[in-house]
Amino acid sequence: MMNLKKEQMVTVKKFSAVWCGPCRALAPVMNEVKSNFSNVKFEDYDVDVAYEEATKYGVRSVPTVIIERDGKEVERFTGVSSKIAYINAINENLK
């Protein structure tokens, strides 16, 4: 029986709010990032609706993007970062 290396499960969680200007600026950036990955799960949370999830992750300001590998937080971005910063962080965690 072959021992296959299990591929890392990477999830990107974006926490934002409708009233947040930087969050609106981040939305098209994240859509472009999403288009680069078919093997990554993307989840969007509105902190005013999903406040329990936001509290669980200790989100204090929006936008916040959290990258998880196999259910563990490995990277966190607060505020808006460049598309390449998100792509590099995701790629790093797919290795």
Image (cartoon, rainbow, N blue to C red):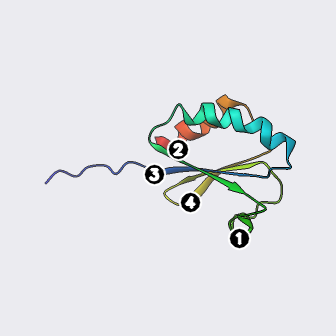
Which x, y percent locates residue 84? 65, 29
Q: CA distance from mark 2 to mark 1?
A: 26 Å
Q: First in sequence: mark 3 or mark 4?
A: 3
For disc 1, the marked residue is 52
- Inspect the image, locate mark 1, and give the three-letter code of the amino acid beneath it: Glu
Q: Identify whether 27 is placed above or below 45.
A: above
Q: Which of label 2 and label 1 is nearer to you? A: 1
Q: Which residue is mark 2?
A: 93
Helix, strand or loop under label 4: strand
> Residue 67: horizontal and vertical position, in percent?
61, 50
From mark 2 to mark 3, how far is it between C-alphas? 9 Å
* Residue occupied by mark 4: 72
Specify which label sits upstream in the sequence, 2 or 3: 3
Q: Amino acid at mark 3?
A: Met
Question: Residue shown at 56%/40% (left/top)?
Answer: 90
Marks 1 and 3: in contact by CB < 8 Å? no
Residues at badges 2 and 3 in contact (C-beta under 8 Å)?
Answer: no
Q: Secondary structure at mark 2?
A: helix
